Image (tube, rainbow, N blue to C red):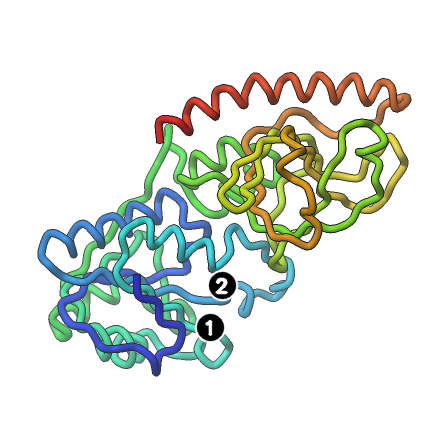
Amino acid sequence: MQIYRKLKDIVSARNTVLTIGSFDGLHRGHQEIIGKVTNIANAFGEISVVMTFDPHPKQILSENSTDFEILLSQQKKEQLLEELGVDITVVIPFDLDFSRKSAKSFVDDIICSYFSPQKIIVGYDHHFGFNREGNSTFLEKISDKYDFLVEVVNPVKDQDEVLSSTRIRNLITDGHVQRASFELGWVFGFNAKVVHGSGRGRNLNFPTANFVPEIANQLVPGCGVYFARGMIGDECIYGMCNLGYRPTFGEEEFVMEIHFFESDKTNNLYNKSIEIQFLERIRDEKKFENTDSLIRQLDKDREFCYSRMTVYKEVQKCL
């Protein structure tokens, strides 16, 4: 997949099938759009193009932009787009100046200037251009002038629920990571850096790796204990993860830590980058009367994770 990060670097292409969007989370609804783009392009010997933005426009335009949490990194988005078979991805640097570009100017100066699309495919709720003035209706009105076709993709639903980035964000915040991953179409997680912790886990015979997300404003699941796994190089190592404040010890700082079940494979992780994937929520974080009670619960948590790990490993064998 060819990636362009600056408009001036784009090598013009003709006979393209194109879509535009932030693709926040690149969930199954977005994948439906991109699947149509690649399928049509492949069927007619054309080039599939995805135009997206970095940073997310809401990080620039929202009144509380620092509160906008990211579902997936740009790196992960590009990885998924390549897996979906996209030929060209254009990552437009989004800033206040660019936000003032009209929808017509966007079509004239960028879409048609560089790609002369045969067809533009967008979602039912897609908007672009200054004040969100561009949408599928706008594209259809100008399609004859620019000689392209327009296709609008309806929302993807599951049991009458429309799959959306907002809905998925709420699921993750509430700890429903398994459902969120189903709606995303990929296992929710993020790249993290391993940092030094207090060493409490080791004293409990449950040594943990403390971690922090690599990107600012990363969306993190709600407080609780999770069945999780770490992608460390080519290794996939299962474990259980705690997100919270460790109330048994009266701490106030939010901590993210994971206990890996194959500790021999997780030596010397400090300052290394790993991908943490959240598979299932086990329970709420709670305050125990003493450390013995906590350890007994951790033993139960581990046994539950072992039972689920068998299922996940069988699924992996089939992939």
The structure residue drawn at horizontal position 20% and vertical position 55%, both measured from the top left corner, is: 151
Left or right: 307 in relation to 6: right
Measured along the vertical axis of the image, is residue 306 above or below residue 28?
above
What's the CA distance linking mark 1 and mark 2?
Answer: 7 Å
Q: Which residue is mark 1?
A: 94
The structure residue drawn at horizontal position 30% and vertical position 61%, both measured from the top left corner, is: 1
The structure residue drawn at horizontal position 40% and vertical position 72%, both measured from the top left corner, is: 5
The structure residue drawn at horizontal position 84% and vertical position 18%, both measured from the top left corner, is: 293
Determine the image quadrant of residue 60: bottom right
Residue at disc 1, secondary structure: loop
Q: Return the mark for residue 41.
A: none
Amino acid type of the residue tagged 2 in the rendering: His
Q: Are marks 1 and 2 in contact (CB under 8 Å)?
A: yes
Q: Position of residue 162 (x, y in %)?
A: 39, 39
Judge the density around disc 1: few (<14), some (14-19), many (≥20) Cα neighbours within 10 Å: some
| Closer to the camera in the image, 109 or 251 | 251
The C terminus lies in quadrant: top left
Q: Which residue is mark 2?
A: 56
Which tag, 1 or 2, sits closer to the chain's start?
2
Residue extending farthest to the left is 44
| Closer to the camera in the image, 54 or 81 | 81
Residue at disc 2, secondary structure: loop
Q: Position of residue 245 (x, y in %)?
A: 80, 39
Q: Position of residue 257 (x, y in %)?
A: 71, 40
- Count of numbered circles on the image: 2
Q: Position of residue 66 (x, y in %)?
A: 64, 63
Amino acid type of the residue tagged 1 in the rendering: Phe
Judge the density around disc 2: few (<14), some (14-19), many (≥20) Cα neighbours within 10 Å: many
Measured along the vertical axis of the image, is residue 167 above or below residue 293?
below
